[in-house]
Image (tube, grey):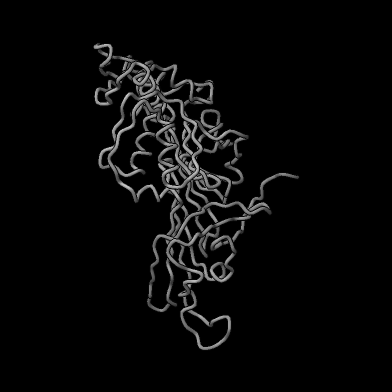
Amino acid sequence: MSGTPPLLVDARPTLSIEGQEDSALGRDLIRLETREDEQGVAELEAVFVNYGAPPAGGPPGFVHFDRQRVDFGKRIAVAFATSGQAETVFDGSISAIGAAYPEQRPPELVLVAEDNLARLRLLRRSRSFEQATDADMVQQLAQSAGLRPDVQLDGPTHALRWQVGQSELALLRERAAALDARIAVRDGAVSVKAAPAQGRPIPLSRLNELIRFELRADLAGQRSAVRVHGWDVAGKQAITEEADSGAARAVAVAQGRTGAEIVREAWGEAPEDLHLEQPATSEEARKLAEARMQSRARRFIRGRGVTRGTPSLRVGSQVELLDLGAWFSGVWEVSAVRHSFDQASGYRTEFEACRAALEQGA
């Protein structure tokens, strides 16, 4: 039937250096792995055979010790074409070069690369942000590193926020975590968003694309509410703001019970009180409480699976998992992805996913 995903996928990756396909690296590839999660800085590790006859002829030798093709800082990209059209799963710069000289095998070249977010790790500084939102700070961090920001954050305006001996990357991760946002590089831009990607979820069936999947709905990290406490310097009064199960329901796609609702049913009220966040306004305290509640809520059910190679799976994308039964089938959000290729298993995609609620009736 037209549009039906294939039962089997046999795909070798395409590797590009500085935007040009490198057929020699593709031919000599032994294995590779790309990794990304919600904290940003995607990584690539690839291993190649590094011994053979040179293209122009002559005695055999090391074939990839060529700075015109392989060098620190050079851009490297990996793409897979499982449905006729190549999809890029990694785009970054070479940050480490290694070699292995195994017994009874040819020498190997090892390339390690990171995406452009790694630039933010290089600069550590101390400064302050006054009357700035989290979106303002993230945009400034990206632009100072020469990156284009793509920010969608609904955060408070901070009267004063310090960066003390902290790398730009650590500050970016701190502010994203405060609002339960996902960090990634997409189409050359630094994407920091507090909501999953929009669009049609990617269907994955236990009877087709999924090789295996396991999950757990766990109340250990769930709370009935989150309360944030602080001090309003201008008003000279204490601040207490609360986010309850309504905040958890706001990030639930399924219509069944959330972890916060089940905790209350099973054990009664079980709030979390936060005293170290130091909000200076009620708005800031409320946003912090909502983000913490939603961060806990959307990790109520967590799963880990493997597919037969799905290059469209990225952090923040949504998947529709099928044939898992009435309790757990439905839409999940992808929180981590690992694309891998080797000579034995071919192309595989491992992923982690989460959701905030069971299906209706569970």
In the displayed structure, would residue 214 be above or below residue 10?
above
Quarter of the image for the N terminus: give it: top right
Residue 244: image location, x then y, percent: 39, 16
Residue 68 visible to an observer of this rendering: yes
Residue 347: image location, x then y, percent: 55, 56
In the displayed structure, would residue 107 be above or below residue 245?
below
180 relative position to 126: left or right: right
In the displayed structure, would residue 249 be above or below residue 148?
above
In the displayed structure, would residue 307 be above or below residue 69?
above
State the residue lying farthest toward the bottom.
59
Front position in the image: 99 or 203: 99
Residue 143: image location, x then y, percent: 45, 42
Q: Which residue is drawn at the image coordinates 44% and 19% (left, top)?
A: 247
272 relative position to 91: left or right: left
Residue 215 visible to an observer of this rendering: no
Front position in the image: 190 or 181: 190
Q: Quadrant of residue 226?
A: top left
State the residue lying farthest toward the right.
2
147 relative position to 166: left or right: right
- Number of numbered callouts drawn: 0
Front position in the image: 57 or 28: 57
Front position in the image: 142 or 313: 142
Q: Which residue is drawn at the image coordinates 30% and 14% (left, top)?
A: 240
Residue 235: image location, x then y, percent: 27, 11
